[in-house]
Image: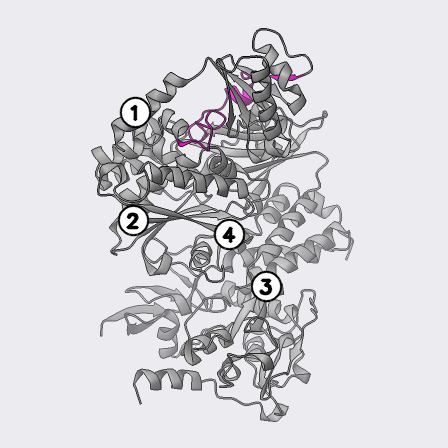
Amino acid sequence: MSVRTLSINGQQVSAPAEATVLEAARDAGITIPTLCHLDGLSDVGACRLCLVEITGSNKLQPACHTRVAEGMEVQTETPRLQQYRRMVVELLFAERNHVCAVCVANGHCELQNLARALGMYHVRFDYLSPTCAVDITHSRFGIDHNRCVLCARCVRACDEVEGVHTWDIAGRGVASRVISDLDQPWGESTSCTACGKCVLACPTGAIFRRGVTVGEMERDSAKIRFIVEARNQRW
Amino acid sequence: MDATELQAIAERNRAARKRIRLHCCTSSGCQASHSLLLKQGLEAAVQAAGLQDEVDVAGVGCMGFCGQGPLVEVDPDGLLFEYVTPDDAPAIVAALSGGDAPGVARGNLRHPFFARQQLVVRRNGGKIDPERIDEYITAGGYQALARALHDMTPADVVDTITRSGLRGRGGAGYPTGLKWATVAKAAGERKFVVCNGDEGDPGAFMDRSILESDPHSVLEGMAIAAYAVGASQGFLYVRGEYPLAIQRLQKAIQHAKKYDLLGTQILDTAFNFRVDIRIGAGAFVCGEETALMASIEGRRGQPRPRPPYPAEHGLWGCPTLINNVETFANIAPIISNGADWYASIGTAKSKGTKVFALTGNIRNNGLIEVPMGTTLREIVEELGGGAPDGATVKAVQTGGPSGGCIPAHLFDTPVDYESLAAVGSIMGSGGMVVMDDQTDMVDVAAFYMAFCMDESCGKCIPCRVGTVQMHRLLKKIAAGNATSADVALLKELCAMVKTTSLCGLGQSAPNPVLSTLTYFPEEYESRLRPR
């Protein structure tokens, strides 16, 4: 295994040559906030929360999509990065109808945790308050688009892990919506295997198991990685 | 087909040429004003006057002076008729034997609009029939490809393009030779050449005009590029809103294949190159190279992070060369006339000419091609003739929704990549929208932001939601409901969206706001209400 040595926030870190900056940081106990990243799934660099500063690069780079390099100097917590991350979360809260108090994921929500961790206490932007549907046509699961952050983790889990690709995204810009099959009600999807991986992958309360109450909304999103690793090692 | 046969075709055509050729523009703009009927009218009038042995009527590509169309030019007499209707045809034909075609507006080919131009890319525009490959060959077409294939190695071609100093005409200005060298060096048995014809900036129609007026010049450039980088498959990505361009390209590809100028064993060599057209479905973001490739592959047209760049990881993971239409149209002249010739045009860092679509509040609307380094003042005042109806020009917007507004006091800025960036705008693909003193700059910023908001693909959060929020703030300011806190928030958001967005669309979306905030702050401040 070939190894690279780099510095993250001044701390010397070594990592396998194929590791991403995000992996190297986590390995060294340095937390970089993420939302669209989920261990086990491919990275798309869409949420921009894991952007870091790299000496010699005039652009911010997504840690999830940037390979480590020898002598690389990475900064993950500059005031500018902190400010941008807070704004990203602020924009998300303004985009759809995120009302924590009545959400099945309250207390177990990555968006909520991010807001808390990044110090995003209030939203300065207009709430867009879009009209979003709730689809509970599926017998076991439901999707509430009011709570969706378009991270596309469900799309990737379904496509890459289950191998089905029931989910995709239709429309563009803020009008983008996660859809099942050809924009049919989830319950009428002919491809969905009801495996529940999208429920595991969803960071918010957007995709949920029907019939669970707020207090029971705990889930094990690490299971995605477990499945992928188990497969790779051919258990 | 080989080089001598190309020459033979050219000579045969020259010999068959009649004494007079009437050039009638048949590009989209003039077609919309009935130039096809006009062409039929001219043909009928020539017949009626018994001049069919002396006069040819040719449907040609764009002459550039689009605001004055439809245009008819008499070659070689140098007469130009403007705003011609089908009813004017007999009068124009009568004027051929001396006379002055009463009632038909006369243009002047010595007008600065024409005289100040230097035609490299648009060398054949308005002169040849784009639907006849023989006319392109007669104008010297495909000689550069023959020269590259017979007399040059791929490395020679890359070297010539590098030394010419040509930079990407899609807007960012990346050195073309360097890009070609990277793809040429990239390991991989399959490589691709892609032509980006997804021109989408509001007010920009340079690439459409090139594709409609001289499709073979783009095909020839692509073939030379494919030879240089070692590709045997090309894709021409053209937006679906350009039906005439697509139709002419299809015809051009067919004709070139028939002449063995595309396909297998091109010009009797071992070089093979196939070109297919892919039609865009109306997303602006598909002009971004990684989104464009996703679209060609049949996936959702969304950008992905770079690196890896297409040069190493492009279409289906293979090394891919992506250049814009205008870049490819520059290639054949560079190979024919040499790198030194090209490098002698333009400025130290920006070589060659650039085509601009001059539109907005300006007297002479249309397409112009000028050497890099020409000042905005020369373009707006001399070629463009200033604002109509006695108004004064207030600003020029370059680079579309990714660019900025340059105020009149900076009109001595030379048009080159670095100078435009220094004043807060960009070269962009070549859109140039002139604004007069009646223009409201907050409205302008809101217009471009609405465009970016509608065209954001929705993948990354800063662009998807940030453009909507910037647009809301701009509308609030325009309506007089904003305070200085809103302007501060707008500035903060601009910086964030510019720095953190995934692709060029989001990274440049704040530019129209930032440039108008810099140069026209009073238009924002005068509308604020006290806190």
Name the residue that disc number 2 marks. B231
Secondary structure under the numbered disc 3 in the rendered image: loop
Question: In front here: B375 or B221?
Answer: B221
> Disc 1 marks which residue?
B7
Specify whether A230 is left or right of B446. Answer: left
Residue A171, label in figure: 3
Name which of mark 2 and mark 1 comes first in the sequence: 1
Indicate the amino acid at tag 2. Ala
Chief secondary structure of the magenta portion: loop
Residue numbers of the magenta segment:
B104-133
Report helix, strand or loop for mark 2. loop
**Circle 4 crowding by C-alpha within 10 Å: few under 14, some 14–19, many from 20:** many
Look at the picture and state if A96 lies above or below B451: below
Quarter holding residue A67: bottom left
- In space, the residues marked 1 and 4 are separated at their CA atoms by 37 Å
The CA distance from mark 4 to mark 3 is 16 Å
Q: Which of pointers 3 and 1 indicates the residue nearer the eye?
A: 1
The amino acid at mark 1 is Gln
Name the outermost residue toward the top: B98
Q: Which mark is residue A189?
A: none
Residue of label 4: B280
Between A161 and B478, the residue placed more toward the observer is A161
